[in-house]
Every structure is written in structure tokens, then in C-alpha cells.
Image: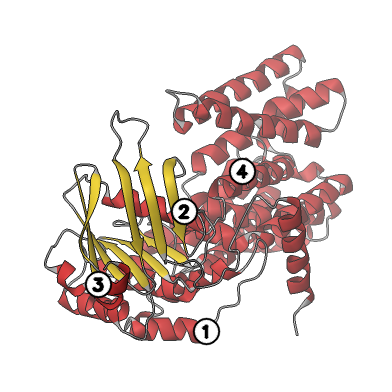
Amino acid sequence: MHSSGYQLRKLFSEAFSNLFPAVPYAAPESSESGDWAVEVKNLAVQIKSQNSPVFSNVSFEIPFHCRTALIGPNGSGKSTLLKTLAGLVPDYSGEIKLFGGEPRLGRSRIAYLAQSPQLNPDFPLQLKRLVQMGTYAHHGWFEECHHADEKVASALKLLELEDLVDRSVHTLSGGQLQRGLLARAAVQGAKILLLDEPYAALDTKSREIVENFLFHKNNSFTVIMATHETADSQKFDRVLEIRDGSLKTTHACAGHKNHYA
Amino acid sequence: MRGIKIIMLSNFLCAFQEDFFLRALLALFLSGISAACLGSYIVLRRMSFISTAMTHSILPGVVGAVLLGFSAYWGALIAALLTAAGIAWISSRKGSSEDSAIGVMLSVMFALGIAFMGLSHSWRDFTGLLFGSIVSVSTEDIGVILGTTGVVLFCLRLVHKELELASFDEEYAHLLGARPGLLRSVLLILIALAAVASVRLVGALLTTALFIIPSTTGVLIGKNLKEVMFWSVLCACGGGTLGLIISYTFQGIPAGAAIVLGCAIPYFVVRIKNA
């Protein structure tokens, strides 16, 4: 039974969506559609302030549930590629499909974690609320957020953060915050995780927890992770290397070799 | 000391028997609630300078409206919206930061207000606009303040979760499609509305204090946005009431200034305690 306030917000949400269909926000989408989780053809990205493109003629496919490492030297374009896949770089040429759809904002099945998330240091927020924000991906404009306590508790447990729920996010260590942001992506229901050097701030324990979360066979994520450490790449199903503005596949996803035979 | 306490208490009781005081108190509570809720976002998003520009820039609108003979509230609203549009336009041009755009619009609009006042050849008529004139709050003013407070609170409630998200993690809000730029514009329009409602209370020069001081106190106490808003509203209403009583007791002190000083008391108490 919903309150009259909820009904009113729902009404506003529907009216707003009808009036402004070009303002997508948390549109529901299926987990898996298309032949590949990620499909990129002849992708080229050029930053306006630079003369030469960051990379060009990049093509690759990533199967569902494949964990992919993205390696390359500093400035090779790893972060730009992840941002482009997330829909944060609208000016690109070529074709990108994620779960059969183009990259755009408002896709709940895709989560992107920046190397250094720009969080407002003044904003008072407890860890539980941070993780609850993942549920916003499933509500339209003006709709009240249902806190989805079970989902939140399960994500916090997965990332071993149960004891820190009431802590301010600003008092968490870099590793704990990174785990909190991954828990938010899990609550969001993301199936493709685009991670930009998530290990940079992690100590051994946090790293173990994050690896368990990302690589556990029950968690059916498709992961693309930018990393500097080539030792990390051994754990992945597939490694993509960007160098000198182009991309080469170094070895194929073990579980999906038929795609690359 | 005991004598002062007795005088304050007797004045406190007398004040509540005066119609104008009760109207002033109602106006203060209504404006205080909307200013404190908006102020929480202003302080947490570090938008104090732009809110100061918006509140100061309503002066030419109000003076112009009085000279032309239409409602001062409409004049104030038009001036505030023009300021917001001017800031957005200047800061979008090459080589102009938002900071300098705010500085330019704040100075130009305030100077325009003073020029209009000079043209009217009567500075005295406008002291109430500059410093507030809460004792002359009419029933019509209460209606306007009630309406704007209602609109501000309703809009804040509608976009609460989006504003919270965009204020804390703008990139994630952008990724979810929640349009942080659009939300910022909504916030600026609401600040304009609330500033218009507060101008009669504390004047164009001090309206910004009603947004900033109680919310800064709330930020020092609250552990989350709801707590920040709760304490901000409490400080705005409690501190403002104290200011009104001081103004009533010591009649040389203008009500607007007394309200701002009253709001500053909890801030300094908390600041010193947390130092």
C-alpha cells in the first residue's frame, strides 16, 4: 500500500517522462541481449585540445561474463576507452554496443568506477546511504527511493563492510571507500563493470575482498579493468593492450575460446 | 543581570500579545524553513558566493518595481532570474570563469539598484528594502511568503534524491542520467524565489545570512543531509526568534540585523565547542 505522497511523485515522474522523453533516467533494461557483452568496431576518439587521436581503429568483442584486463602505459588511452564505453565521451567515431545497445547515460546495467572518484568532501554521508544510492538507478524522476535493505545488506556483506554501515564515507580508508563504491554498483544491478585501476588504493586484505567479488563464479559480471600491473593480468580471462594509439589482443578468454579460434 | 533577565522575560511575554510581532514571527518561521533547507545545499555544494549574488541582485528589481508601480515581489524575482541567466551566459563564454561572472553580475546589479534609488530622490523609502522591515509585514506579505515557501519545499521534496546524489557525486549522477546541470539551474531558481520571500524580513543586504549562517551551523552538527536540514531549520527559527525579541526589547536595533545576529549565536556556540 503506497502513500498519497508516493502516488503524487509517481504521477509527476510519469508526466515528466512523457513531456521530456529525451531525458532518460534509469531506464529498465534486460541483462543480456546482443551477441556479445561488449562489441567495438573501428572506434576512434579525439580530444578537442589534442591534434592526434587518443586511439583509432580499435575493434574488439568481449563475451558475456568475461573478465578483461586493459593494460598499457600511462596516457595510452585506457581511461578514455572506459569513459567512452560508459557513455561519458559522446564524441567518438565507430560503433560501440554494450548488451546490444549504444553507450549512453542512464543505463542501470553499466557501472563505471573512476580511478579517483570526485566525491564532495563536505557532504555528510554514511556508508549505508552511499550504497543505497545504487537503487536510484531503478527509479525515475521524483520517485521516492525504496531502500532495498536486503540488496544493500547483501552487497555490504559481499564486500565485508557490514561493520562500517554507519561510518561517514569521509572517514573510510581508500580501500574501504572503493569497496563501498563497488557495493553501490552491485545494488545498482550493474552487469558490466568498467573499472579504472581499482587496485590503486587497496591494501592486501581489501584487494583480496575485491578480487573475490569480481572473480567469484556466482557473480556473473562482465568486467573490463584498466590496470598497470601486468602480474594482475594473469587472473583475467582476456587481456587487451593499448599502445601507440592502437589496440591488440594478447590472449583470449579461456572460457570462451570458441569465439577466438 | 537578574534585572535584564526580568526585562527580557516581560518583553518576551508582551511581544506575543502584539499582532505585528506574531505576523513577523510567522514570516520568520516560513522564510527560515525554506532558507535553511535551501541553505543546506548551498553550503554543502559551496555555492555561498552565487547565493550572495542572487540575494543582493534583487535590489534593482525591487526599486524598479516600486518606481514603476507594480509588485516589488515580481521585480525582485525578475532581477534574480536575470542575474542567474547573466551568470550562466558570462561563465559559458571563453576566458570567463563562473567566479568572475558572479562577481561582475553581483556588482553590476547592486550598482544598478543604487542608481535607481538615486533617480527616485528618496533614499529613506528604500531603507526597509536594504535592511529589512519585519515590523511592517502585512497579511499580503505573509501570503506571498507562504506561497514561495510551499513551492520551494515542494520542489526540494520532488528532486530530493537527485539533488542529494548530484551534490555528493556529480559524475555518478551524470552516469545515471540525473542531469546535474539541470538540477543546479533548478536550485538557482529556488534560491531566487526564497530570496524574494526573505527580502521584506531582513533586507537585500542580509538575506544571504539567512541562507548561510543557520546551514553552516547545521553542517557542523548533522551527520547526514536530513540532520543538517533539521538543525539548520532549528537554528534559523530559534536564532531568528531570539533576534526578534532582542529587537523588540532594544528598539534602536533594526529587526533584520537582530535576526542575523540571533542566528549567529548558535553558530559561534557550536563552532567554539567543536574548535
x 37%, y 46%: residue: A43
Give me the C-alpha separation between circle 1 and circle 4. 32 Å
Give me the C-alpha separation between circle 2 and circle 1. 24 Å
Q: Using a 10 Å C-alpha cutoff, classify the residue at mark 3 as few (fewer than 14 neighbours), some (14 to 19) or many (20 or more).
A: many
x 16%, y 68%: residue: A232
The location of residue B247, given as percent across then percent down, is: 67, 48
x 45%, y 25%: residue: B96
* Circle 2 SS class: helix
The location of residue B58, given as percent across then percent down, is: 68, 32
Residue placed under numbered mark 1 in the picture: A149
Question: Depth-wise, is mark 3 or mark 1 nearer the camera?
Answer: 3
Amino acid carrying label 2: it is: Glu
Closest to the observer: B54 or B17? B54
First of labels 3, 1 by sequence position: 1
Residue placed under numbered mark 4 in the picture: B185
First of labels 4, 2 by sequence position: 2
Give me the C-alpha separation between circle 4 and circle 2. 14 Å
Name the chain under label 1.
A
Residue placed under numbered mark 2 in the picture: B170
Amino acid carrying label 3: it is: Asp
Q: Are marks 3 and 4 on the same chain?
A: no
Residue placed under numbered mark 3 in the picture: A237
